[in-house]
Image (cartoon, helix red, strand yellow):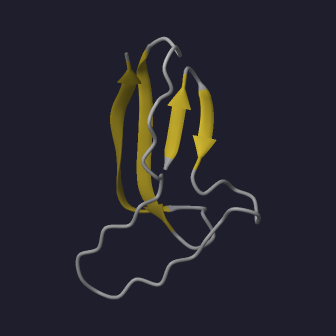
Amino acid sequence: VILDVFGQLFFAPSFSSFDQYTVDVTPGLHTIIVLPEFTWPAGVGSASNLWFYAGMTDPAVTGLLGNYDAVPFGWE
């Protein structure tokens, strides 16, 4: 998952060994929480036209497996 905030990119997991993780998934339908739920604090203003990009990569994080998607994001 990549969060694009006005051109600054945030990765989950990032490309460091500190916060990268591996998950073994058995065949079937699964829901995996990548970014935990977050409540925006009061008084932080608003933003729009931010984007989440998501896709599944190979283990080396060098290529996409299948398709990716983009979802607009913002808050008021």
Question: Whole-percent x and y of residue 13?
Answer: 60, 57
Figure check: 30 above or below 4: below
- For this rendering, which residue is in front, 68 or 1? 1
Question: Whole-percent x and y of residue 60?
Answer: 63, 70
The outermost residue toward the bottom is: 26
Figure check: 35 above or below 66: above
Q: Quadrant of the C terminus?
A: top left
Q: Quick check: 14 left or right of 52?
A: right
Q: Tell me the quarter of the picture where residue 22 sits.
A: bottom right
Q: Tell me the quarter of the picture where residue 53 sits.
A: top left
Q: Residue at x 44, y 36 (%)?
A: 39
- For this rendering, which residue is in front, 68 or 14? 14
Question: Whole-percent x and y of residue 5?
Answer: 54, 26
Figure check: 7 above or below 32: above
The outermost residue toward the left is: 29
Q: Tell me the quarter of the picture where residue 49 sits.
A: top left
Q: Residue at x 53, y 70 (%)?
A: 58
